[in-house]
Amino acid sequence: NNSEQFAGLHLLISAGGTREPLDPVRFLGNRSSGKQGLALAQVAAARGARITFVAAHVDQTVETMAGRLPNTEVVPVGTAAELNDVMRSRADTADVIVMAAAVADYRPADIAELKIKKEDAGDELTLQLVKNPDILAGLASTKRPGQTVVGFAAETATDRANLLELGRAKAKRKGADLLVLNRVGWSEGFGTDSNTVVVVNAAGDIADEATGSKRDVAEAVLDAVLAARA
Ligand code: C5P
């Protein structure tokens, strides 16, 4: 029985995809559904955690189900900057931080006040983008003692060895305690109901592996979190 494993612990979980506005009606987004983040919240809730679920853009069902979880507060956000603000302000009381959100690496340099019109822009329109802060790296660098920081890395890797190579380099760059690696492509990862992951620690060593539903992956990730905290 593991229903008390996370009793007394506060988990701060981000999920979904950020949306970076271009003008009042358009944004740059991504295909994240928020399902993996929801699965983590569901498993953590079943194991007794208190949860803050920071939802960037997620599927409607994800929002509905997150809202029904016990001991869970859902905080909606839009842009990477908003997500960063919420994560930083809630990190103080978090025992475990999981960045499952797909964060835009870049945002438009300017947000047009009025709708961008093709009559004005002509045949070619160039967008200038500026880099967003790396939220995960920031949280890892200001981590409190006893706090566990977990990130995800979706890679378009050619195979498992390539996935590990890319993931290990990223684990070192980000400084998170655990990095959950998964292969993505047009038919894998985003929006689907199952997933294959390898969890590595900050040194790049394999901490856990899982294939199955996003729920199975969530179980494995939270097992790795417990093992890392032991
Ligand atoms: O570098 P990459 O985007 O692959 O890293 C993915 C991990 O970093 C995810 O956990 C994601 O939530 C996080 N991330 C972030 N801030 C960014 C970009 C990614 O926290 N600007």
Image (cartoon, rainbow, N blue to C red):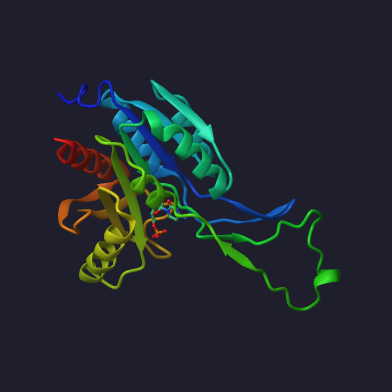
- Residue 59 visible somewhere in the drawing: no
Residue 173 sits in quarter: bottom left
Side of 94 relative to 130 (left or right)? left
Residue under the point 24% across and 43% down: 221
- Residue 215 visible somewhere in the drawing: yes
How far from the left and from the top, in percent, is residue 33?
47, 47
Q: Quadrant of the C terminus?
A: top left
Side of 40 relative to 224 (left or right)? right
How far from the left and from the top, in percent, is residue 225?
22, 40
Side of 84 relative to 173 (left or right)? right
Residue 6 sits in quarter: top left
Q: Quadrant of the N terminus?
A: top left
Quadrant of the picture in which ligand 1 is shown: bottom left
Depicted 104 relative to depicted 218: above or below? below
Depicted 84 relative to depicted 127: above or below? above
Depicted 69 relative to depicted 149: above or below? above
How many numbered marks does the figure carry? 0
Of residue 191 and residue 5, the one placed in the foreground of this image is 5
How far from the left and from the top, in percent, is residue 229?
18, 36
How far from the left and from the top, in percent, is residue 198?
22, 55
Residue under the point 58% across and 48% down: 79
Residue under the point 67% across and 69% down: 127
Name the residue furthest right: 119
Side of 10 relative to 6 (left or right)? right
Residue 174 sits in quarter: bottom left
Name the residue furthest bottom: 123
